[in-house]
Image: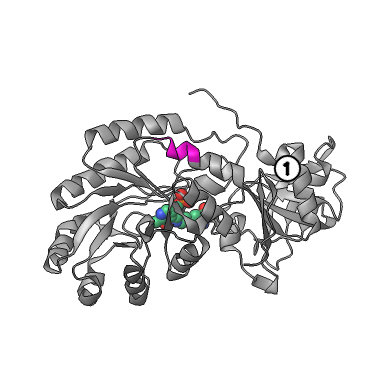
Amino acid sequence: GEVRPRPQPWWQAPMWRDALLQRAEAGTPRYVYHLPTVRERARQLRAIRAIDRHYYAIKANAHPEILRALVAEGFGLECVSLGELDHALTAVPGLDPARVLFTPSFAPIEEYAAALARGVTVTVDNIELLQRWPEVFRGRALWLRIDLGYGDGHHAKVRTGGKEAKFGLSAARVEAFMEVARALDVRITGLHAHLGSGIESVGHWPQVVDALAGFARRIGTVEVLDIGGGLPVPYGDDDEPFDLNAWEAQLTAAKAVHPAFALAIEPGRFLVAEAGVLLARVTQVVEKDGIHRLGLDAGMNALIRPALYDAWHGIHNLSRLDDRQWRDFDVVGPICESSDLFGRRVKLPQASAPGDVMLIADAGAYGYSMASTYNLRALPAQDILDDTGAAPACEHP
Ligand code: LLP
């Protein structure tokens, strides 16, 4: 197909660039999230009429302002732990539990019981859970997560389907599950499949609709098909943006074949990745054996995606955006591991120097939410930027 160029990222506009440089003065490493971009992504998905229910997977980024913005845009929230659940219910005052999903994996039974007590929609994904704790689930309406037998996604570590994956009920055991469920007077009102993250083929989701609809017709009580998250974002300059128009067309066709069911999605990355940047300062510039290294005050503890998945993030010198003399640098952090590397041979201004403010792009998803204090380095700070100007800083929540 034709190549659709990436629009200029928000942070290249002089107004936002200046705002970022100003925020960096308050200390780095610092994540900054641009709420207008979050809202824009939310509206793109809400505009797809074939989708009846929209949830946000808060594991991608649970900043309270982001949760409130997305709920205001009509999204419910998908949570995977009691910690996420209580965070969501606290961060969004008055949030209707009916708009919250609880989709844990191998969580302690107390978390299922607590989620049911809070009135949110609980998804189970195995038979053993019902057999071992019938008293927790008896008489409930639940959703069921099914492993359709394959996974997909940007890296083996984020594919969540297939025999070797721990998620979901094997498709071969749906009948057996339903026998146990009926005996407990459990009604299955939703079917769920999330088979991975960063899935590039638009055909993935309509295929999931077809597969889940087949099970739903046999079960008889299903109202909602939740076809997961997993929408990709273009991290690299050569990555094409996800083709939302083609996606909409295919989902609309799939929905026309299975009009009896409401369709739900639960993306994380798509809504927040491009809205977030990680700001860091250059600590040292060092040449060793012909390799030039730029050291940052942010390391793999602040953003683990490159170390964990060999993920690629754009890296820019925000203090020298207009420089035109380049040099290849390996961009590293201050953590004592060789995996503490944001990029090899990255073209950056030759004059890059200690104190410069560096920007790591598209870091709004699975950045802060996966940060740690490894090496006893502090968690990064977090800030919000909005059209109305500056919202107050939210340090280490
Ligand atoms: N629903 C379920 C049940 C999930 O497990 C996930 C993500 C999502 C929805 C949202 O997926 P998304 O739309 O963000 O792809 N840390 C990895 C990604 C792990 C995704 C885990 N599950 C990364 O940084 O690439």
Above or below, comparing residue 312 to residue 259 in the picture: below
Residue shown at the point (86%, 55%) measured from the top left: 354
Q: Quadrant of residue 124?
A: bottom left
Colour approach in the figure: one colour
Q: Position of residue 214 (x, y in %)?
A: 19, 45
- Residue at mark 1: 16
Q: Position of residue 132 (x, y in %)?
A: 23, 76
Q: Quadrant of residue 38?
A: top right
Q: Residue furthest top?
A: 2
What is the secondary structure assignment of the residue under circle 1? helix
Residue shown at the point (46%, 64%) measured from the top left: 89
Residue shown at the point (33%, 65%) measured from the top left: 119
Q: Quadrant of residue 351?
A: top right
Asked whether 47 falls inside the magenta stretch, the response is yes
Residue range of the region highlighted in magenta in the rendering: 43-48
214 with respect to 310 (left or right): left
73 with respect to 54 (left or right): right
Q: Position of residue 303 (x, y in %)?
A: 63, 58
Three-letter code, disc 1: Trp
Give the dominant element type of the magenta stretch: helix, strand or loop. Answer: helix
Above or below, comparing residue 137 to residue 391 in the picture: below
